[in-house]
Every structure is written in structure tokens, then in C-alpha cells.
Image (cartoon, coloured by chain):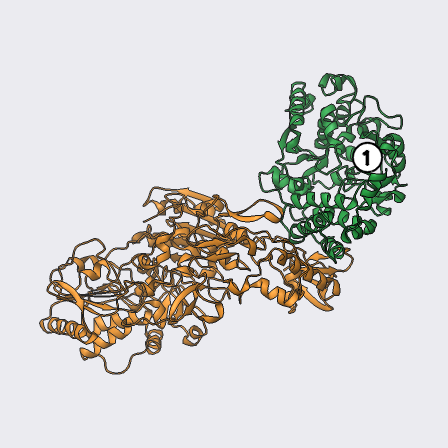
Chain colours: A green, B orange
């Protein structure tokens, strides 16, 4: 959700066109330095482009935070195979809704980012793999692609440079797992959306078995400002090793939920109390999931933390995809955990044993606990099943389910025990008296 | 040779070639790492997570089935963490498993049972309701029980990669994932049962075997499949003197684990209701039951009359009888009955090939050469329909060794999909097609040429001359139809050639001539059905020896019930000239082996005195038939022995070569009596269908 005015604490870089009239149109884009970065990139060598991205300390915005420049440098440019650029627009992580604003309000910045990547690795085709629920965005993107083609930014011999590149949208079909990069590639190729064995990584064997640059939408959108203003300028906006700004989607029990562009390393408590207008109804903060539902939950007292990849890792959680889910004191943590695990049980692709069976088991036990039908030993079962999944599944989806399960139980054990012993839910008590 | 890699597994040093997986490296030193989804020869999955091991310097446990050995790698498979991970995986697999082992077909030979026994916990903590899905039947052969399935995807991969069919896939997701036919609710496939055999649990079961017996109640007898000429070993499961199933799970034969529908499920024909259980003699125009003594006496008298009058006797032999029986029959015919009129239904021009490659030790390919050769040319044959083992071998060669495959045919065949070149020619122009490939073939380091009946007579010599002109080692396979078609020709069931393709001074009538000859006093047809749909031959007396009352037997004056290949001992020779041993699995009341019938008649005619055994005959064959110097001891140990081309050999100048052009689900007359072959839906045929 976009507020009419940016919050004063925001640093509007990727979102700077959002509030312009007809922000998605190519005319607006061209009037605001649009495609200037690409023009500049045309005059640069591929090595210089990658070097600039490396200098920016840009790290993947999809969740894993892998350094983007390094990822691009792994693509074997002199491979005889065609190379592909793939944008991961399968934004499916609960709590995350930032890419959709980028595509809605500034689709050309995504195209320009992909163009620069194509220039850097010598790709001639790009795909935007977009979640099926974003149908309205596919229309916006297709329109932007058509505009770019008409103005000569896509197609053959772009701007007379001899470079050919075109972009196609490809709709997902409702699978969270297809946000995992190799499952996305399988799905893109028309196969069942299950992850691939790695190595080989997509950089060497991605789409159709060819070298591929695969990045999140926001990552691509950060590239034009980096090329235009220089990598260092971008890096300096953030903290060391965590360059630039980032779009945070703040949801839950706050007064002003929404998407905010803030520098990397912005304090989480400030984010909640200042930027998002504080906890709703003046209630007490209870817990925060800082980076989308797959990240370990933080207790209120753990929330005085800088929002960058490294600081959150030290705090025992993850920056993930920037979906900040705020929960106040009325929240039943058993209910929250059960809801999250039902999501993962529903979305597990089923390919590997521990994720397929573990997510279902966790969801069943937690749902039972939520209904007050817990049995002695259930809490240990949840902790133990989560531990048996962690680090042992084929792809990170198993971890994404195990981490919230074990962190909820460990950090809010008293609530789970209360549910088990038939006492009223502590959270409900708070809700009544609040 | 690349430098070997040295790594340490459980404190033991192991040296392996680069690219070796840790799971295989461990196996080399006797360390078993448990796995379900890992399957040698198929693509890697990493799905079951049973094979997790600790690797030094790697924070997480690693799957040994996807991890390549690296120099200095230190692997541990015996730590508490690994044991705990295995226990957890077994627990996960059992959460939704019905635990219906007492009534499950797989009980006693189930990998999940074994794993739970070795690595699992004694108790499960899973107390939730299980997700039930009703069992599905996909075809007369294949049934699927989802709750038992552990989703290792072996079935999906063996069908796609091993068979080249790809009939199976996965539908739904998460805990509701299921294996499903890609056609929706039914299979359109080879019905080979590879998916069932490879299933580690009881999720896939076969319509023939399910709920018949328990694995440990059967006797297991390894013999050679009675149908096509590829010579697959099949281990017959016998319960109460009935053959329940075939398989080759121990990969002990030249076919590895491969079997087609015939080898696995068509072995019920010996128990068919129409099986002859007593001799029949014609009285007042009708065939009626008779005793062996009556029937043999009648045959004896007709033979004696013929011998006394000097009237000609014709004999047509079989593609299914053993080498020893064939050898004995030709000896009985030529030396005892003194007739040159001997032939069998010929399905490939073996004499022409033997004459063309006579004296060349290495000119004949073995089954394993099809998997190992750098290049293979398939001409005028649809191997997937007629020689499924050869098709499997070539496909595996392409997948594992990137062999180059060339196809010359008059229509699409399965090999087209991975062929380096496919050439379409009009039927009968196959040789021209081959000659047109000269430039490509010349660049190959070696070649195996597989050719069907499309190339026969003079063309075979031209083909071999062309092979010689390539300047590379070339081996040949002349395709023939049935389990001992090769042996029938090798043993000299031919009008102008004796055993080992040696020319005879006096040549006799070929099959077609005998069927038209009114002068024949006796026509004796052994295990052949040349009259299918035709008229009775004008011979004065017709003796037919067979398992069933075939079209030919119906017209006979005397019918003698014979035992099938699954009821006798002896040897057969496959399409590649590999001699293998048959073992009797069952006995059927009333029938006698062909050899016993021959010797009974010979004795009545005063032509045989001492006892005749297949071992003695094999010794005689070994010492007298050119090219057949095989080791009886090796055969007894189950090692196939390839025969060599004779030093000198002649082509046959009489008679015709005609393939029956069977499909995967037909096999001449015999195929009609295997229940499953008539129950399955005809496979989407490719070419050369009958």
C-alpha cells in the first residue's frame, strides 16, 4: 500500500517515481532520467558494469542476500550457449508486497535493470516470471514492454548499438515454491515447479540449461540508479556490506502499514514506532517477524536491531524479503504459528521427504494445539520435527517452515504450554482487558 | 586415465575416479549408505534424504547420492547426528504410511521395511489422522496405492529414462503429491512393469502377482524368457507348481534388471486352460484323446511305412525348442530317417551373415556391446516393439556414454528421438539408406550394425562388404524373432545346411515346398504353426508336436503335447549368439519335452539305444558344431557363452526369410496364450507392426 506522501525518514530512490502522474508510462520514465543508465551502460564494457554493481554492495532483495555483482560475474560470457535474464516476480512470501509496487508504478525501471544485466552478460532474451495473482501487473508490464519496443529500447539493434534484447512476461500458476529460483526455472520451462539439484547454479546452467542471471525485481530496479550515480553512491546509503536502500513492507498491528523505502540498517523499532506510526491502539509490541513469514520471530525486547542482513543474522533472524510483520500483545502466538505452518504445508512442493511430511505434521499438531486439543509431548514434537527438517530438506522451503515453528515455540513456550494445559490463551486474556 | 581421487570415509581411505558419488565411493569399501531415491543408472534426485552424511568443513549434512567425491574430503556416516537424521527420515516416511505390511504384496522384499528395521525408531510419535487415497488401477498390469508411496520417483525416472516412454509423472503437491499417468487416469505405455519392479515399497503392484502369494512362499527359478530372441534372464516365482511372476531384481542375467511385459508377466501360458494334456489322434475325421503309447505307435507305423517305401518325409522344426533338441532332431532326420527335407520358420537371414563373416572371431556383437559401442546403426527394425532389450541397451548407451545412434527405417522408431541421424527410406531400400550414411559412419571409431529381415540374401554380403570398407571395427546383429530362432539355424534346421552352416551334399525341400508337396508320406511339425489360417498341406500324414491345439495342430492326424521352455532343461542361443541355460520351473501333467518325444520315437524306430540327456547332447554340440565350443561349466554357473562364426559357412539358397513382425504385445502363436498380452491396450505402435 502506497501512502500519498513518503515518510520523512524515507530515502526515495527506487520509489522516486511512484507518486508521479502516469508513473508507469515510458514518457514519465524518460522525463525522469529513464533509460539514461542503460545508455551509459552501452558505453561501458561488461566488466565495468559488473564492477560498478559490485562496488554498490547490492545484495539480492529476494531473501538470501547474495551479492548481485558477484552473481553476475559467475555467468560464463564466452559460453557458446545463449544467455538469459530472468526476473523473479513471484513475490509469494507472506508479509512481502514490495515488488508489486515497483512493477505497478515503475515497470520501466525493471526493464532497464534487465537491459543492463543483458548488456553485462550478453543475453538476448529476458523473462519476467510473475505470480499468477498479479494478473493486473502482467498487463502493466506487457504495456511497458510494448512501449519500450516501440521506442527502440527492446528488440533488435537497440539504439543502434547492435545489441538485441527482448523481454517476455510469464505467469506462474499459484505456487510459492516457484519463487525458489530453480523451481522457477523449471516452471518457466513448462515443467512441474520443483527445485533442481544445485550445482550447477543458474549462472552456468539456468533457463533451458543456459547461463542465466536470475534476480529479484527489486534487485533489478536498483541497478539503473547504481549505474547512473555510481556504485559507491549507492553503497553509502546503507551500512557496510549492505548497500543502498530497501523497500520494507510493514504489515500487522501498526497504525500506518505500507511499503517504505529506507536505508539498509534502519532500526527496526524506529521503523515500527516512527515510520509505521506505532502499534495500533496504543497496545504493547509483542513480536515481529522481520523479513517475511519464513524468518524466525523476534520478541519485542529483541527488536532494537539494525535492519540489514548481517545485524539480523546476529540477532538470530533474517532480513529475508523485507516483509516486516508486527504483532501486538493481543496476538495468540499459537494461532500465528499454526497459520504460518498451514501456509507452508499447503505450499510445500512435496518433492523431498522432510519438507513434505514435516510441514504437514507441524501444521497438524499446531492446529490441534490452537484448538486446545493438544496432547502432552506436542511441544517437544514440534521442536523436534522442526529440528529434523532444518538444513536437511532439498531446498530452503523446509527451513522456511522449520524456523518459524521452532522460534515461536522456543520464544513463546509459555503460551503453548497454556494451550496445552487448557488454560485460557494468555493472548486472549490480554485482548479482553486491553 | 584421469588422476584418481583419494577421500576418507569413516576413517577409511578410498580411491575413486573423479566424478564418483560419495554413496558409490562408500560402497566400494563396504560402507552401505541407505537410500531410496538414488538408483544406479538413473538421474539424480536427492529427494528421499535418507543418505545424509557428515562432511568435514560443510556445516549441513550432505546427501551422499548427489555429492561428488573431492580430494581430501572427510566423510562420516557413523555419527550420532547421521543416525538421528536417518531415524528422522524413516519416521517422516512412515507418518502417512498405512503400515499394512501384513497384507502388502511387498512385505518381505520391501526396502522401507528393511530401512525401518535397520535405521528407524521402534515407536512413532505420529498421532495424527492419515491421509487416505483409494487405490487406482492404471492398466491391467499396473496398480497404484498412494498411501504406501514414498515418492522416490524411481518409477517416473525408469519409465522416462530407462524405457524412453515417459508415461508417468507427479500431480498435486506437498503431502498430496501423487504419481500419476501422464495420460490422466490410465497408462499408454510398454506395460513393462519396470516401474513396479523398481518400486522400493508396495505402492506399485502388478495385476498378475498382487495378492497371490508372499515372496518367501515362492520358489525362485532363474531361466531364459521363452518369447523373443533377446535372451533375457527371468527369475520365475513359482508357487504350488504355478508361475506367478518373473523378474530379474538381482540383475544376474545379460539383461541386468531389464524385462519387458513378456518376461515379467506372460509366463502364465504353461497353465493356460487350453494346454494339451494328452496326445490326440484323428478318428473318423475328429481328433480324440489317446494314450502316449497309442499315439506313438501310430506315428511309428507311418514312419516305418515311409522308410520302407522310400517315400519322402518332411520335418519342420521350431524357434522355441532347445539347442539340444534341435541338434537331436536334425540328427534324427538326416541320419535316422535319412531325409534331407528339414527346415524351420526362418525370421532373419542368419546363414547369409554367417557366410559373410565366416572365420572372423569378433564380427558378432554381444548384448553388452550395444551398451558399450561408440556407435550403433539400427536398420529396418523397430527395436522397441520387437527387441525391447536391444532398444533398452542402446538407449542406456546413449544416456550414459553419449553413443551415436543411426537409424535407417521406413517409418518412425523410438531410436529416432536420440539418433545422431535418422534416415527414412521406402520399405526394401534399407541397404541404400545405410550406404548413404557412409561419410558419417566413417568418422566413428567403431560400429555395431543391427539389421532386420529387410536386409537378406545378397544384401547381407553387400552390407558386410560396406562395413569392411569403412575401415573401422564393425560388429553385426542379424535380428530373428524367437527365443531360439538363432539356435534352430545354428543347429542346422535348414534344407541345405547342417549344423554350423556347413553345406550339405544333398539339399532338401524348404518349408514352403514341404507345405505344398503331395508326395510327402509324413510331415512332422515340431513347435511351429505355419498353417495359421491356411489349408491343410497335402502330405499324407501330419504329425504336430506343440503346447496347444494351434491352427496347424487342428489339421494334424496325430498331436503330441509338448512341454514348454519353462518346463525343461537345456540351452538356447539368443539373437547375439549367446548361449544360455534353461531351467525347468514347473511341470505340466501329460506333456513331454520335445527331446523325450524325439527319443521315444527314435527308440521305437530302432534308431536310438542308450539314454539321451541334454548334457550329453551339449557335449556333442560343443565338440562337433563349428563355432559352438562353449563351456558347459560356465553355462551351468549362469554365464552366457557367445558362439563364434564358423571358420567357413555357406548361405542358404533354398527357402524364405520372413519375420512375424510381432509387436511388444504379440509373440507368434505363443503370445496368444499369455493372458496379459491380450488384456493390455495396444501400445502406440511405431513401426513394423504385424
Residue A236 visible in the current orientation: no
Q: Seen in the image, is A217 located left or right of residue B679?
A: right
How crowded is the residue under tag 1: few (<14 C-alpha within 10 Å), some, or many (20+)? many
Q: Is residue B329 left or right of residue B114?
A: left
Q: Nearer the viewer, residue A57 or B418?
A: A57
Q: Is residue A237 above or below residue B475?
A: above
Q: Is the N terminus of chain A in the top left, top right, bottom left or bottom right quadrant?
A: top right
Q: Point out the residue furthest to the bottom here.
A: B610
Q: Is B47 situated left or right of B244 in this image? A: right
- Horizontal placement of B316 versus B46: left or right? left
List x then y, in percent, for residue A411.
83, 49
Residue B109 seen in this snapshot: yes
* Residue B210 picture quarter: bottom left
State the residue in front, A231 or A306: A306
Query: Which residue is label 1 attached to?
Result: A253
Residue B465, image x and y in percent?
A: 37, 53
Quarter in which the C terminus of chain A is drawn: top right
Looking at the picture, does residue A238 appear above or below residue B174? above
The answer to whether B241 is drawn above or below residue A323 in the figure is: below
> Which chain is disc 1 placed on?
A
Q: Quadrant of residue B226?
A: bottom left
Q: Position of residue B102 (x, y in %)?
A: 53, 65
Disc tally is 1
Whole-percent x, y for residue B513 in the image? 18, 58
What is the secondary structure assignment of the residue under circle 1? loop
Name the one closer to the observer, B491 or B557.
B557
Amino acid at each position: 500500500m502506497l501512502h500519498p506522501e513518503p515518510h520523512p525518514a524515507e530515502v526515495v530512490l527506487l520509489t522516486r517515481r511512484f507518486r508521479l502522474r502516469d508513473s508507469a508510462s515510458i514518457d514519465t520514465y524518460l522525463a525522469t532520467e529513464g533509460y539514461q543508465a542503460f545508455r551509459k551502460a552501452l558505453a561501458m564494457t561488461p566488466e565495468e558494469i559488473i564492477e560498478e554493481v559490485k562496488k554498490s554492495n547490492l545484495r539480492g532483495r529476494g531473501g538470501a542476500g547474495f551479492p548481485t555483482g558477484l552473481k553476475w560475474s559467475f555467468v560464463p560470457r564466452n559460453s557458446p550457449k545463449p544467455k538469459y535474464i530472468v526476473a523473479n516476480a513471484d513475490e509469494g512470501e507472506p508479509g512481502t508486497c514490495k515488488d508489486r509496487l515497483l512493477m505497478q508504478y515503475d515497470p520501466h525501471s525493471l526493464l532497464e535493470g534487465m537491459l543492463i544485466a543483458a548488456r553485462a552478460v550478453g543475453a538476448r532474451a529476458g523473462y519476467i516470471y510473475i505470480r499468477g495473482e498479479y494478473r493486473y501487473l502482467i498487463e502493466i508490464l506487457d504495456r511497458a514492454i510494448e512501449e519500450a519496443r516501440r521506442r527502440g529500447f527492446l528488440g533488435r539493434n537497440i539504439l543502434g548499438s547492435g545489441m538485441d534484447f527482448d523481454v517476455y512476461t510469464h505467469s506462474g500458476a499459484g505456487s510459492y515454491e516457484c519463487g525458489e529460483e530453480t523451481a522457477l526455472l523449471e516452471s518457466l520451462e513448462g515443467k512441474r515447479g520443483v527445485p533442481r539439484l544445485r550445482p550447477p547454479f543458474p549462472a552456468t546452467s539456468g533457463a533451458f540449461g543456459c547461463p542465466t542471471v536470475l534476480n529479484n525485481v527489486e534487485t533489478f530496479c536498483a541497478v539503473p540508479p547504481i549505474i547512473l550515480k555510481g556504485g559507491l553512491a549507492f553503497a553509502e546509503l546503507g551500512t557496510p556490506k549492505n548497500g543502498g536502500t530497501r523497500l520494507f513492507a510493514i504489515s500487522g498491528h501498526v497504525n500506518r502499514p505500507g511499503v517504505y523505502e529506507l536505508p539498509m540498517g534502519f532500526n527496526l523499532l524506529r521503523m515500527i514506532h516512527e515510520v509505521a506510526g506505532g502499534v495500533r491502539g496504543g497496545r504493547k509490541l509483542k513480536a515481529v517477524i522481520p523479513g517475511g513469514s519464513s524468518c524466525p520471530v523476534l520478541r519485542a525486547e529483541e527488536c532494537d536491531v539494525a535492519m540489514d542482513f548481517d545485524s539480523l543474522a546476529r540477532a538470530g533472524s533474517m532480513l529475508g524479503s523485507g516483509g516486516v510483520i508486527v504483532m501486538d500483545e493481543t496476538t495468540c502466538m499459537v494461532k500465528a504459528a499454526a497459520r504460518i505452518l498451514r501456509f507452508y504445508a499447503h505450499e510445500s512442493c512435496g518433492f523431498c521427504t522432510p519438507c513434505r511430511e514435516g510441514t504437514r505434521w507441524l501444521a497438524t499438531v499446531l492446529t490441534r494445539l490452537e484448538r486446545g486439543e493438544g496432547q502432552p509431548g506436542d511441544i517437544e514434537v514440534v521442536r523436534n520435527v522442526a529440528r529434523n527438517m532444518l538444513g536437511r530438506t532439498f531446498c530452503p522451503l523446509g527451513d522456511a517452515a522449520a524456523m518459524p515453528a521452532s522460534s515461536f515455540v522456543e520464544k513463546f513456550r509459555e503460551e503453548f504450554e497454556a494451550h496445552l494445559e487448557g488454560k485460557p490463551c494468555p493472548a486472549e486474556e490480554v485482548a479482553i482487558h486491553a | 586415465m584421469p588422476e584418481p581421487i583419494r577421500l576418507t570415509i569413516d576413517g577409511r581411505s578410498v580411491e575413486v575416479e573423479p566424478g564418483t558419488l560419495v554413496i558409490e565411493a562408500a560402497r566400494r569399501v563396504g560402507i552401505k549408505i541407505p537410500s531410496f531415491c538414488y538408483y544406479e543408472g538413473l538421474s539424480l534426485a536427492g529427494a528421499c534424504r535418507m543418505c545424509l552424511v557428515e562432511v568435514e568443513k560443510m556445516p549441513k549434512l550432505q546427501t551422499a547420492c548427489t555429492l561428488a567425491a573431492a580430494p581430501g574430503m572427510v566423510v562420516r556416516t557413523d555419527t550420532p547426528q547421521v543416525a538421528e537424521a536417518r531415524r528422522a527420515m524413516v519416521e517422516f516416511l512412515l507418518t502417512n504410511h498405512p503400515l499394512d505390511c501384513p497384507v502388502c504384496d511387498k512385505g518381505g522384499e520391501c526396502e522401507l521395511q528393511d530401512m525401518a528395521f535397520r535405521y528407524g525408531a521402534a515407536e512413532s510419535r505420529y498421532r495424527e489422522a492419515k491421509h487416505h487415497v483409494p487405490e487406482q488401477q492404471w492398466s491391467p498390469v499396473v496398480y497404484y496405492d498412494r498411501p504406501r508411496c514414498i515418492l522416490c520417483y524411481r518409477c517416473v525416472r525408469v519409465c522416462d529414462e530407462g524405457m524412453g516412454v515417459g508415461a508417468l509423472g507427479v500431480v498435486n503437491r506437498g503431502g498430496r503429491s501423487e504419481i500419476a499417468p501422464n495420460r490422466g487416469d490410465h497408462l499408454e505405455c510398454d506395460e513393462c512393469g519396470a516401474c513396479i519392479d523398481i518400486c522400493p515399497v508396495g505402492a506399485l503392484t502388478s495385476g498378475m502377482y498382487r495378492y497371490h502369494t508372499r515372496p518367501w512362499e515362492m520358489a525362485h527359478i532363474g531361466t531364459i524368457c521363452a518369447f523373443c530372441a533377446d535372451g533375457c534372464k527371468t527369475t520365475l516365482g513359482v508357487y504350488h507348481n504355478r508361475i506367478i511372476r518373473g523378474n530379474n531384481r538381482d540383475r544376474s542375467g545379460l539383461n541386468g534388471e531389464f524385462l519387458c511385459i513378456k518376461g515379467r508377466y506372460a509366463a502364465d501360458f504353461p497353465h493356460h486352460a487350453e494346454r494339451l494334456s494328452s496326445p490326440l489322434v484323428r478318428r473318423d475325421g475328429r481328433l480324440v484323446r489317446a494314450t502316449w503309447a497309442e499315439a506313438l505307435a501310430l506315428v511309428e507305423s507311418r514312419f516305418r511305412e515311409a522308410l520302407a517305401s522310400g517315400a519322402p518325409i518332411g520335418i519342420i522344426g521350431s524357434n522355441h525348442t532347445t539347442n539340444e533338441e534341435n541338434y537331436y532332431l536334425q540328427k534324427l532326420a538326416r541320419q535316422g530317417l535319412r531325409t534331407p527335407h528339414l527346415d524351420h520358420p526362418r525370421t532373419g537371414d542368419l546363414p547369409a551373415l554367417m557366410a559373410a563373416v565366416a572365420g572372423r572371431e569378433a564380427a558378432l556383437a554381444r548384448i553388452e556391446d550395444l551398451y558399450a559401442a561408440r556407435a550403433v546403426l539400427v536398420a529396418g527394425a523397430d527395436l522397441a516393439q520387437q527387441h525391447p532389450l536391444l532398444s533398452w541397451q542402446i538407449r542406456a548407451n546413449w544416456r550414459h556414454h553419449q553413443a551415436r545412434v543411426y537409424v535407417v527405417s521406413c517409418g518412425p522408431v523410438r531410436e529416432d528421438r536420440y539418433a545422431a541421424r535418422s534416415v527414412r527410406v521406402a520399405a526394401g531400400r534399407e541397404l541404400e539408406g545405410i550406404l548413404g550414411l557412409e561419410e558419417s559412419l566413417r568418422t566413428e571409431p567403431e560400429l555395431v550394425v543391427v539389421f532386420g529381415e529387410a536386409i537378406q540374401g545378397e544384401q547381407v554380403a553387400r552390407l558386410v562388404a560396406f562395413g569392411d570398407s569403412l575401415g573401422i571395427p564393425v560388429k553385426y546383429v542379424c535380428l530373428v524373432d524367437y527365443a531360439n530362432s538363432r539356435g534352430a539355424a545354428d543347429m542346422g534346421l535348414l534344407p541345405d545346411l547342417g549344423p554350423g552352416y556347413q553345406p550339405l551334399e544333398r539339399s532338401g525341400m524348404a518349408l514352403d515346398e514341404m507345405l505344398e508337396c503331395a508326395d510327402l508320406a509324413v510331415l512332422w511339425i515340431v513347435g511351429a504353426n505355419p498353417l495359421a489360417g491356411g489349408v491343410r498341406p497335402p502330405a499324407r500324414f501330419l504329425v504336430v508336436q506343440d503346447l496347444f491345439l494351434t491352427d496347424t495342430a487342428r489339421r494334424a492326424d496325430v498331436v503330441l503335447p509338448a512341454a514348454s521352455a519353462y518346463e525343461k532343461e537345456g540351452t538356447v542361443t539368443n539373437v547375439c549368439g549367446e548361449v544360455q541355460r534353461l531351467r525347468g520351473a514347473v511341470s505340466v501333467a501329460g506333456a513331454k519335452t520335445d527331446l523325450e518325444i524325439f527319443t521315444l520315437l527314435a527308440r521305437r524306430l530302432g534308431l536310438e539305444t542308450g539314454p539321451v540327456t541334454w548334457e550329453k547332447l551339449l557335449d556333442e554340440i560343443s565338440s562337433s558344431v563349428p563355432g559352438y565350443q562353449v563351456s558347459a561349466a560356465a553355462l551351468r554357473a549362469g554365464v552366457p557363452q557367445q558362439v563364434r562364426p564358423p571358420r567357413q559357412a555357406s548361405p542358404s539358397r533354398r527357402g524364405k526369410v520372413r519375420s512375424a513382425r510381432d509387436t511388444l504385445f504379440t509373440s507368434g502363436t505363443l503370445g496368444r496364450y499369455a493372458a496379459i498380452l491380450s488384456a493390455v491396450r495396444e501400445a502406440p505402435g511405431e513401426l513394423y507392426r504385424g
